[in-house]
Amino acid sequence: MSNMLPAINRRSALQMGSLVLLLGVQQIARGATILAVRVWPAKDYSRVTIESDAGLKTKTYFIAEPPRLAVDIEGIDLIPALRELVAKVKPDDPNISGIRVGQNAPGVVRLVVDLKQHMRPQVFTLPPVAAYQHRLVFDLYPTQVADPLEALIAERLKDKPGAGAAPDPLSELLARRSERPEAGKPGGDAPSSGPGDGKDPAAGPSPPAAQAPKDNTKGGAPDRNKTDRLVIVALDPGHGGEDPGAVGPGGTREKDVVLQIALRLRERINKQPNMRAFLTRDADFFVPLHVRVQKARRVQADLFISIHADAFFTPRPQGASIFALSEKGASSSAARWIADKENSADLVGGVNAKAKDAQVQKALFDMSTTAQINDSLKLGGAMLGEIGSVGKLHKPRVEQAGFAVLKAPDIPSVLVETAFISNPDEEAKLRSEAYQVQLADALMRGISGYFAKNPPLARNRPL
């Protein structure tokens, strides 16, 4: 018996040797396999994602002049999938001018990201979640960031060329910030996006504008302590970038339709005197939940409206819903389920855990007030009545739950589930221009109705 062992070992060795010749050494003793590479360009920041079937080890180097990020990825060899990154960078990427890849050493690929300006790079990994396996992420944030509030005010003044009584941008900027000084501070991992000029050719007639209340002082003399200020409505298209949100049976992605609806609503808001819309994202990129809140507070938003498209396990549920924050728990098990689903967006979209300040997060999310919730319920009620005139409602009242994105302590905030994207009929409606136009008109009427009963207060000018 013992004499047979060497023969078996030799036979096994010969078989293994043949297998190596047939398959190649890399496939026998390989490291990670690259599954996909993606580039997400945006004004706020650009993201590069490398997805693999196993975790990747890296060494990173940032070179200031000319600005570029070099990353050595260990345990892999240069393959066509990595070369695809070169072609994925578009000329109009605001932050990346190009990507170079090469075999730096056996089992080490060097990736160099050439930058258009000085950046704050963040390199981190994400564990498998949802449809994704292991991800290596490069987030590239510009160091020079325009003030989004100043941009909104300057945009407003462009529309009033002959208005000599209008305050200059700096005066109004200071006036708004004196009202809530803590909200004027930069607060997010990513800078805020400003207003765009996308136009909706199908936009209908504008509803009455929501304006600051007129002064009724004795004798009609203007109150010099008050300013004709800008009213800002923050629109928050859900999901984006790495996070597609819910996907309908026909392949419609939530992140795409809610952005289209938000752009249509922005067009209507920007037609109102003294009103501007601010988008937490105006393109296909991911924004963490806490950054969405911080962006709205940074521009001193008067309202915050998060736009989504609901989904369920079965195709039967239908209708639109509106949610406000709850201090005492969810108003229904369905509301709790939806809140949990929306609150998991950070896991799918991918947040750099090391960059988050846990104490700041806790402080922000524990400051919600009863007054904010009451105002949110009023806003939700005004909008729900208008949405009900253009489609079915899932529930006839504003529901409440612990949505992380609604926890700005000083801004009335609601989350609108425009329809069930998991319902084939409603998925088709969400994709149609006609329904998007009707929905944007209804939301605008709801905003105007809220301001008609709850006029935005005039800000005090600083002395």
Image (tube, rainbow, N blue to C red):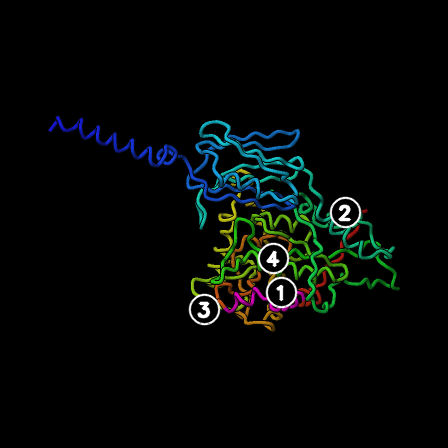
Which element type, helix, strand or loop, lies under badge 3? loop
Q: Give neighbour class at mark 1: few <14, some 14-19, many 20+ (Cα, 10 Å).
A: many
Amino acid carrying mark 1 in the image: Lys
What segment is highlighted magenta in the picture?
425-444
Mark 1 = which residue?
A: 378
Which element type, helix, strand or loop, lies under badge 4? helix
Residue 160 in the image: state x and y as whole percent: 82, 57
* Badge nearest the viewer, 2 or 4: 4
Amino acid carrying mark 3 in the image: Arg
Mark 2 = which residue?
A: 174
Rounded to the nearest angstrom, the CA distance separating label 3 from label 2 is 51 Å
Mark 4 = which residue?
A: 259
Residue occupying image coordinates x 80% and y 54%: 158
Visible residue check, residue 90 = yes
Which element type, helix, strand or loop, lies under badge 2? helix
Rounded to the nearest angstrom, the CA distance separating label 2 from label 4 is 31 Å
User: In the depicted view, which residue is nearer to us: 44 or 434?
Assistant: 434
Mark 3 = which residue?
A: 316
Rounded to the nearest angstrom, the CA distance separating label 3 from label 4 is 25 Å
Mark 4 or mark 3, which is nearer the start of the sequence? 4
Which element type, helix, strand or loop, lies under badge 1? helix
Give residue 140's quadrant in the image.
Answer: top right
Above or below, 100 against 284 in this view is above
Q: Give neighbour class at mark 4: few <14, some 14-19, many 20+ (Cα, 10 Å).
A: many
Q: Are marks 3 and 4 in contact (CB under 8 Å)?
A: no
